Image: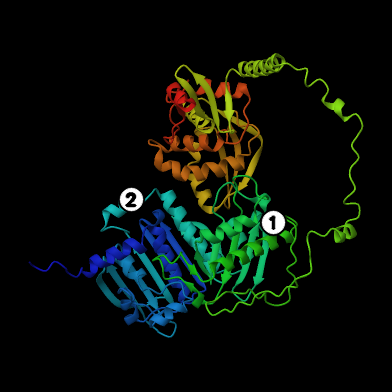
Amino acid sequence: MPDIIQLLPDAVANQIAAGEVIQRPASVVKELVENAVDAGADEITVVIKDAGKTLIQVIDNGAGMSDTDARLAFERHATSKIKNADDLFSIRTKGFRGEALASVAAIAHVVLKTRQPDSEIGTEIEIKGSALDHQEPISCDNGSNFLVKNLFYNVPARRKFLKSNTTELKHIINEFQRIAIAHPEITFHLKHNDSDIYHLPKSNTRQRIVHIFGKSINANLNTLNNKTSLLNITGFVGKPEFAKKTTGEQFFFINKRYMRHPYFHRAVMRAYEKILPKDTFPSYFIYFDADPSTIDVNIHPTKTEIKFENEQAIFQILQASVKESLGKSNVIPSIDFNTEGVIDIPVTRKDTEFNPPEIEVNTSYNPFETDHIKKDYPGYDKKEKIPDEWEQLYAGIDSLSQTDITRQKNIFNEDIEKEIDLRNEFIQLRSKYIVTPVKSGLMIIDQKLAHERILYEQFIQSIAHNRNIAQRELYPTKIDLDPSHYILINEIKDDLALVGIDISDLGSNTIAVNSCPAGFEGLDPGDILEQLLEEYKTTEQKVGGSATKAVAASLAKAAATPYGKYLHTSEMQQIVDELFACENPNYSPDGKKIVAIVPLEQLDKLMN
């Protein structure tokens, strides 16, 4: 039988590695910008075209590379960050695997121009699909200039699964923010299609957060600062009253590296228990500084999943730190943390010796003796005086016949039946479902999904018949947006106008809402837009047809009657009537089931 095991060609191996490291244009931005940080740059510029599908350019003024290093940098597992296995336990740089440039070069056209500060001449190298096209000396600035063009040109299946430009740009901005927030000492510049998104000067951490998320966040931040023998925790946590209904401002960093950590996120949320508005998320920017030997960053190609020693102890420290910060602003009862120096957190290790606690025991104590109780609790044995004529309280009970008791029960049941009749047999269950009897059994309607379908079809009908459904605002609402949301709003502004939301662009990531759809009186335009944008980023991929339909579906979802809202009988009646007047009353715009019927046969089985 012939041998069947063979070594993969380098080009194929690089494409497989690229599938783990380079998932979308944002992955390229992350790897190149992190390399620039590791190179010691204090100014980094990122230029994007068509959300990275056409061009990604990263320019830095870091250490640069020699002509030999420039070529070796594109080989697999070629790195300057580590030299032996022990170095994996003392990593403070962003990258160390030596996979990034090899992976990028395997699925794109890459041009690198680089020069070291002490060299008079630089190097230009061009690689296409892992193959060297040319390398030659050139005149260029200090540092490195990477151009990545035609991403996934040789892997069409991967390119086909890229999302819209808006979605891909959102991912790029997320990766850019994570690095920029961790390094306020570096100047960052991000441009997309010749438009500036961010220009972030050197600053401190708080100023960097304000530059990225807007001036309004400044009043929201409480300082976090605790030093322990296990690790140091610094940063900021948001005040509960400024919590948002969408995620996006939750950041953990370990040794200036962004990380995801659901367990620590739970610690933060526990600190906010009972003080956070329902269905909202607080902002937090939390920086851990720990000995690299106590963490493992080498468990995932993207290095965003980090394993800690003593995670349970850190959980407690983090929860207490957040509570302390909130307590200082009188959000919760304050805890006294005025401890001089470093707090010593005892950590249990394998060789830890345990000593039993020393307590004093009174061996002569007799629980059956009452003398000491009389002494300590005078009057304990005094009996309460029973009031005279207490028997009259129960007078007449014996005279009630079984017929009287039955009559009382019937009157009570009749009252309940009358109440059901008055309510037209509509019952709201757990402020989520509308329940009503039908011939075949019980019909159950999801109140939020039903309202989504009603609003969606109203928007679509208004658009189809060119009806003006806008309600002009007396005073336009000014809203500061995250740059990614600002870009998205301007892209769908015309579609928003068709469903009754008129927006003016005021520049500098700021808009004004001039009108909202009729019937939206009393709703905050900022809240509606915030939810609409978050919904649109997912609904866009689910609802077929034009972007207008996706906008209509997103707006319907953002404005629909929420779970937890009590509905009067007339409101339930209106929702049911309007739902069954829709073209498709059974499913929401994104395909979720609205109506279910429990047959009488099933109810009979439950009762037998």
Pointers 2 and 1 in contact (CB under 8 A)? no
Give the vertical position of 39 relative to 591 (above or below).
below
Residue positioned most to the left: 1
Q: Nearer the viewer, residue 329 or 471?
A: 329
Residue 442 placement, left or right of 119: right
Q: Nearer the viewer, residue 576 or 60?
A: 576
| Dot 2 alpha-carbon crowd within 10 angstroms: few under 14, some 14 to 19, many 20 or more | few
Residue 280 placement, left or right of 549: right
Q: Which structural element holds mark 1?
A: helix
Q: In the figure, residue 370 lies in which quadrant?
A: bottom right
Q: Residue at x 65, y 52 (%)?
A: 273
Q: Nearer the viewer, residue 434 or 184?
A: 434
* Residue 430 place in picture, x, y as percent: 58, 33
Q: In the figure, residue 562 lies in which quadrant?
A: top right
Q: Nearer the viewer, residue 373 or 551?
A: 373
| Dot 1 alpha-carbon crowd within 10 angstroms: few under 14, some 14 to 19, many 20 or more | few
Residue 584, which numbered label? Answer: none
Residue 399 placement, left or right of 194: right
Q: Residue at x 27, y 57 (%)?
A: 155
The mark that comes first in sequence, 2 or 1, is: 2
Q: Amino acid at mark 2?
A: Phe
The CA distance from mark 2 to mark 1 is 41 Å
Residue 161, which numbered label? Answer: 2
* Residue 514 place in picture, x, y as percent: 61, 37
Q: Which residue is mark 1?
A: 219
Q: In the figure, residue 103 lies in which quadrant?
A: bottom left
Q: How is the image coloured?
A: rainbow
Give the vertical position of 419 relative to 101 (above or below).
above
* Residue 271 place in picture, x, y as percent: 64, 57
* Residue 333 place in picture, x, y as percent: 75, 57
Residue 149 placement, left or right of 587: left
Q: Amino acid at mark 1?
A: Ala
